Image: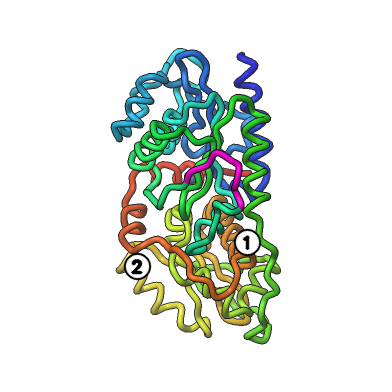
């Protein structure tokens, strides 16, 4: 096996083990070796990179063409006779093909995401001296890949901030990529908020059918703060939130309000809300949430305690949400996640 793939595995496992950088099956990585692009398989978790075959070999030149022209069927570009040639390439394969660097790492880091969610946040001030660019929100997949391809042709940035989504970093060694990624996160870091206590903590009540309490002290603290909850109920903040939780978090003052909201959601979005705050009590999560869904709740709680109160936020539009909920590629990713044991 190539040394570079081993190095990519180690880098991926390290980055994937940090829930502040990657949650669940989110994020992906790649390396280019001669005319082959090795990219993470759909539905797999970066942190498993040392234990499982994670990378799919694809024809690099054809993948680049696909990325720039907005084609999406990367399955056709697999090099079947190499290890991993039977896996399904990530839905974000195009961004890896488009970046010119040998190593590319795409993550969903808390502070980068927060920085792109806060409206008019002056990221340029913090990233001064780095070779970076930023893209407005575009649904992950072909459209995003061709936008990245365009940026690369303009001035080939090493760092691309994706609004309401995450970060892409390219470099010529795994160390280079890791250092840049951590540097960006450090520069964009925000202090943890002191949460207001608008609601008295009250005892957890029975679980409504189909839901369970999210057992985490932070969830309870957020449920006691009106301002913290508001950041999560305003709208969906990232695409994986829509994919795994159905959309924005819901807030209710009494558990009996849940039934009507479930019906409403079902008729509007075809799913029931994945995350429901009950004021003063805690957070309910849908019982059928996958591990990826639970990891998403953790990310949202981190955003709630780090994004300052009372700032305007960028949220996904209803149209953004609908296009994510109707996406077949995502259904595959969720199905893989649902089978996950550990
Ligand atoms: Zn992503």
Q: In this view, does 58 lie to the left or right of 264?
A: right
Question: Which of the two residues, 139 or 210, is positioned nearer the viewer here?
Answer: 139
3D distance between C-alphas at marks 1 and 2:
27 Å
* 247 displayed left or right of 220: left
Classed neighbour count for the residue bearing mark 2: other residues with Cα under 10 Å, few (<14), some (14–19), many (≥20): some
Residue 127 shows in the view: yes
Q: Which of marks 1 and 2 is in front?
A: 1
Give the position of the C terminus as an image quadrant. Answer: top right
Magenta span includes 128: yes
Instruction: Residue 89: say if magenta.
Output: no
Compared to 99, does 329 lie above or below?
A: below
Q: What are the residue bounds of the magenta stretch?
A: 126-133
Q: Quadrant of residue 69?
A: top left
Secondary structure of the residue carrying tag 2 is helix
> What residue is shown with label 1?
302
Please rate how many residues cluster around mark 1, counting C-alpha atoms within 10 Å: few if below 14, some from 14 to 19, many from 20. some
Q: Position of residue 171 (x, y in %)?
A: 58, 29
Front in this rendered view, residue 155 or 340: 155
Residue at the (65%, 22%) spot, across then down? 6
For residue 76, above or below residue 261? above
């Amino acid at each position: 096996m190539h040394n570079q793939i081993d190095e990519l595995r180690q880098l991926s496992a390290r980055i994937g083990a940090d829930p502040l950088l990657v949650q669940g099956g989110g994020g992906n990585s790649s390396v280019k070796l001669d005319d082959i692009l090795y990219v993470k398989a759909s539905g797999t978790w970066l942190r498993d990179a040392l234990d499982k075959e994670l990378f799919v070999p694809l024809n690099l030149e054809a993948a680049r063409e696909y990325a720039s022209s907005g084609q999406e069927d990367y399955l056709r570009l697999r090099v079947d006779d190499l290890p991993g040639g039977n896996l399904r390439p990530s839905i974000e394969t195009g961004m890896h093909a488009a970046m010119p660097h040998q190593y590319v790492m795409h993550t969903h880091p808390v502070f980068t995401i927060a920085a792109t969610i806060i409206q008019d946040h002056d990221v340029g001030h913090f990233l001064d001296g780095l070779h970076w660019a930023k893209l407005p929100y575009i649904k992950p997949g072909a459209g995003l890949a061709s936008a990245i391809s365009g940026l690369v042709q303009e001035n080939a940035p090493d760092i691309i901030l994706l609004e309401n989504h995450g970060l892409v970093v390219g470099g010529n060694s795994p160390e280079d990529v890791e250092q840049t990624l951590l540097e960006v996160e450090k520069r964009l870091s925000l202090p943890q908020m002191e949460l207001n206590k608008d609601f008295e903590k009250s005892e957890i009540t029975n679980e409504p059918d189909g839901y369970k309490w999210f057992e985490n002290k932070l969830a309870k603290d957020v449920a006691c703060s009106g301002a913290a909850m508001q950041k999560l109920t305003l709208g969906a903040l990232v695409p994986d939130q829509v994919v795994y939780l159905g959309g924005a978090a819901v807030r209710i003052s009494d558990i009996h309000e849940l039934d009507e909201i479930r019906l409403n959601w079902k008729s509007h979005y075809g799913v029931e809300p994945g995350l429901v705050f009950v004021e003063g009590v805690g957070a309910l999560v849908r019982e059928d949430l996958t591990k990826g869904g639970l990891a998403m709740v953790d990310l949202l709680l981190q955003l709630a305690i780090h994004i300052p109160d009372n700032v305007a936020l960028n949220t996904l539009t209803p149209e953004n949400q609908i296009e994510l909920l109707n996406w077949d590629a995502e259904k595959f990713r969720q199905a893989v996640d649902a089978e996950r044991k550990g």
